[in-house]
Amino acid sequence: MGERIDGERISSDELEKELTLSYLREKYEAGTLSPQEVMATIVERSIADADMNIWITQPTMDAIQPYLDRLSSLSLADAPLWGIPFAIKDNIDLAGVPTTAGCVEYTFTPDEHAGVVERLIAAGAIPVGKTNLDQFATGLVGARSPYGDAHNALRPELISGGSSSGSAVSVARGQVVFSLGTDTAGSGRVPAALNRLVGYKPSLGAWPTKGVVPACASLDCVTVFAHSLTDALVVDSVARGIHAEDPWSRNVVRKPAGLPKRVCLPAGELDFYGPYAAEYRIAWLRAVEQVREVSRREGILIEEVDVELFAQAAAILYEGPWVAERWADIGPFIEANPGVAYPVTEKILRSGAAGEYDAASVFVAMHKLQQYKLEARKLLQNAVLVMPTCGGTWTREQVLADPISTNRDMGRYTNHCNLLDLCAVAVPAGDAAPETPFGITLFAVAEEEGLICGAAELFAAGAESKSSRADSAAAAQTTLVAVCGLHMRGYPLEKQMQGCGARFIREDESAAKYSLVKLPTSPAKPGMIKQQQGGAAIQLEIWEMPLEAFGGFVAAIPAPLGIGKVELRDGTEVPGFVCEAYAAEDAEDVTALRSWRNVVPL
């Protein structure tokens, strides 16, 4: 049990079962809940779920306490993940805690955090434990671990999905707000679909993989599971960026959420499998109809495409020489310790040592893949591809009885992604059967993560058009507000937005008609000035605020700032922060940076 300041106690039932960033930050800011209480409740929940095999290193207050103590040196307003509990897949390093990769004999204790973990902790996040996984991240079923197969969060007799099994289930069971997984062939997406979560897989290299036990180092991504895309993108904003000591990291900027010109859907019939194949087929057809309806209303072109390209690319991963990359990393350990790995895992790893995978075969596959990448890039120009995340699911017993073919099926619509250098987000799309979630995944080329975010938000909104969203906002007596600086998420004045009852809607950007200046105030503030000629698109956040609070909010804004009409990139106008032109004379022009987040990073 946790302790309130006034001496009252909080039980596990009092804390929301579905933990989110907005919920905890609201409670923390109001002083009605403390991180200490939250962590104590999480420990309780992990104990209650012990038979679900979620954790390898179980949450304990002794291990969590140093991170709680550190919060006193951080400002809630300045730390976007202040007091937010998260889980770490046990192939990602947490300093001082064993990394097992799901194999007892492989275990080592790192001296430093993985690159992405270090960034999250610096932003105030609290690591609570290390989660179960398919051994050496080899599998998509969650049933390949000597620590037991992680149970599905909703129906324990079904698989949880892998390899990031425990990470997904920890979020779905209310033990963390978000969790880290890894994704080489779909491990950051399949468990999301099977546990009714969002799984965000950034572009290759966008998040550092330093401190991650490699599966296929050239394809590995660190990923995030959360209950909403909003929460996942807050984590992304902290985790993203080049790491000086990571040879695989690269500068991939996530553009503001926007809508694609085209939505690509698979032409013809898709294959479904497992005991719920018929239900999954119906769920997919239902999801397709919703995608079509929403796209029509938004004026987005629907295009049916041949997805054989993606199947051919996927085959390279496990039916070609890329499996040798796994052997290159893990093979020396397996050779030195025969028989210690999970039997099916060792069989798969050893296949990478087959004589057919010689140097020439690697180059043949590389050249073939390069052609596939070119074709995929042409196909997905200004577009997103929508596919089922999974074509079915299995019971845990079925997977244990037939571990190879069941696992192969789970990767049917996922394996192509990293090979083709795509980004992806898996989102829930209703249930195929009672308590049996169904999900879709949106894919785009690496530099267009904004498109999958915008499309995911749109489809999740349930067929609301721009006009209907505006009508509903008016009916609810609210107004949209565009903010470009200290009122954005994670900055000091975000609490003013929340205090006015405002809620974050989406990321966006202005029309390419504005300059951005850094005003000589303390703290520094941005000023957006519309230009008669020239200018740039400035990245914004769109919030929705009750009209009853809007007047007082506007009245409190000091000159030279004010609220005017801000033109967005799609030509619509919304109320938002603008600046008097005279202020530019004494201000620093930072237009080239295009975002206040680039001027004053969090």
Image (spheres, grey):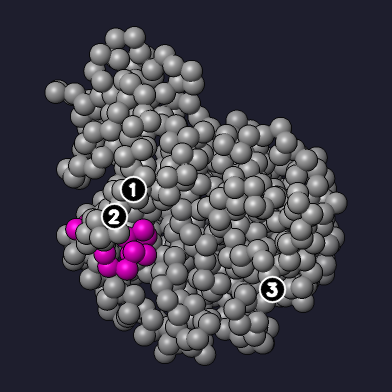
* Crowd tier of the residue under label 1, counting other residues whose Cα lies within 10 Å: few below 14, some 14–19, many 20 or above: few
Q: Amino acid at mark 3?
A: Ala
> Which residue bears the numbered disc 2?
477
Q: Amino acid at mark 1?
A: Glu
Going from N to C along the chain, the mark reached first, 2 or 3, is 3
Residue 305 shows in this picture = no
Q: Amino acid at mark 2?
A: Gln
> Which residue bears the numbered disc 3?
150
- State the SS at label 2: loop
Residue shown at the point (69%, 73%) measured from the top left: 150
> Which residue bears the numbered disc 1?
548
Decide: marks 2, 1 in contact (CB < 8 A)? yes
Inter-mark Cα distance, 2 to 3: 46 Å
Query: Foreground: 561 or 454?
Result: 561
The magenta region covers 456-467
Inter-mark Cα distance, 2 to 1: 8 Å
Query: Foreground: 241 or 234?
Result: 234
Q: Residue furthest top?
A: 586
